[in-house]
Image (cartoon, rainbow, N blue to C red):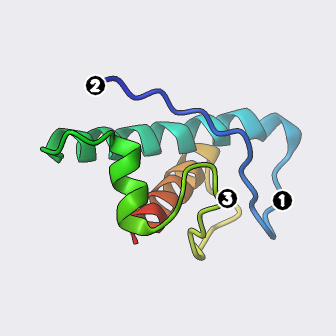
C-alpha cells in the first residue's frame, strides 16, 4: 500500500514561523507522519484501511482535528527538527 499524505491546515498556537519556513516545516511534518503510518501499515494485518484503523482506534473521525498536545521547542531548532517533533506528536495524538 502506498501512503500519500497532504496536510491542508496545521494550526500551531504560539509558534512564530516566518513565511519562508512554512514549506520546510510542512514537508517535515508530512514526512514523519508518512513514515509512522507506513510502519503502522506494515504491522497491520487487518483488511481495514490504515486511516480507518488509526482513526477507529482513536475515536477520531477523518477530517476532524487531532489534539497533539504540547511539545517543547527551542528557537534555534531547524524546521526539519521541529517538523519531526510535531509529526510525532500528531501521530501519537491519532493513536490515543
Q: What residue sits 67% from the left and 58% below the top? A: 76
Query: Which residue is labeled 1 in the image?
Result: 16
Name the spot of residue 32 as percent of width and height, x first.
Answer: 44, 44
Indicate which label's residue lies in the foreground, 1 or 3: 1
Q: Marks 3 and 2, how far apart in space?
A: 37 Å
Name the spot of residue 75 as percent of width and height, x first.
Answer: 71, 63
- In the rendered view, tell whether residue 76 sits above or below residue 36: below
- Residue furthest out toward the top: 2
Left or right: 55, with 75 as reference point? left
Q: For this rendering, which residue is in front, 39 or 50?
A: 50
First in sequence: mark 1 or mark 3? 1
Q: For the residue labelled by badge 1, is the local secondary structure a helix, a strand or a loop? A: loop
Q: For this rendering, which residue is in front, 60 or 39?
A: 60
First in sequence: mark 3 or mark 2? 2
Left or right: 84, with 3 as reference point? right
Q: For the residue labelled by badge 3, is the local secondary structure a helix, a strand or a loop? A: loop
Q: Marks 1 and 3, how far apart in space?
A: 12 Å
- Which label belongs to residue 1? 2
Rendered-image quadrant of the N terminus: top left
First in sequence: mark 2 or mark 1? 2
Name the spot of residue 51 as percent of width and height, x first.
Answer: 41, 45
Q: Residues within 10 Å of mark 1 (few under 14, many from 20)?
A: few
Q: Residues within 10 Å of mark 3 (few under 14, many from 20)?
A: few
Q: Residues within 10 Å of mark 2 (few under 14, many from 20)?
A: few
State the image quarter where residue 13 is shown.
bottom right
Rendered-image quadrant of the C terminus: bottom left
State the image quarter where residue 88 is shown.
bottom left
Indicate which label's residue lies in the foreground, 2 or 1: 2
Q: For this rendering, which residue is in front, 16 or 66?
A: 66
Q: What residue sits 56% from the left and 58% below the top? A: 86
Query: Which residue is labeled 3 in the image?
Result: 76
Q: For this rendering, which residue is in front, 60 or 88?
A: 60
Amino acid at each position: 500500500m502506498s501512503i500519500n499524505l497532504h496536510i491542508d491546515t496545521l494550526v500551531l498556537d504560539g509558534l512564530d514561523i516566518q513565511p519562508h519556513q512554512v514549506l520546510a516545516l510542512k514537508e517535515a511534518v508530512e514526512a514523519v507522519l508518512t513514515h509512522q503510518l507506513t510502519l503502522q501499515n506494515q504491522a497491520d494485518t487487518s483488511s481495514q484501511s490504515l486511516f480507518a484503523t488509526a482513526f477507529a482506534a482513536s475515536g477520531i473521525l477523518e477530517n476532524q482535528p487531532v489534539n497533539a498536545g504540547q511539545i517543547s521547542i527551542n528557537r534555534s531548532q531547524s524546521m526539519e527538527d521541529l517538523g519531526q517533533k510535531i509529526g510525532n506528536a500528531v501521530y501519537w495524538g491519532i493513536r490515543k
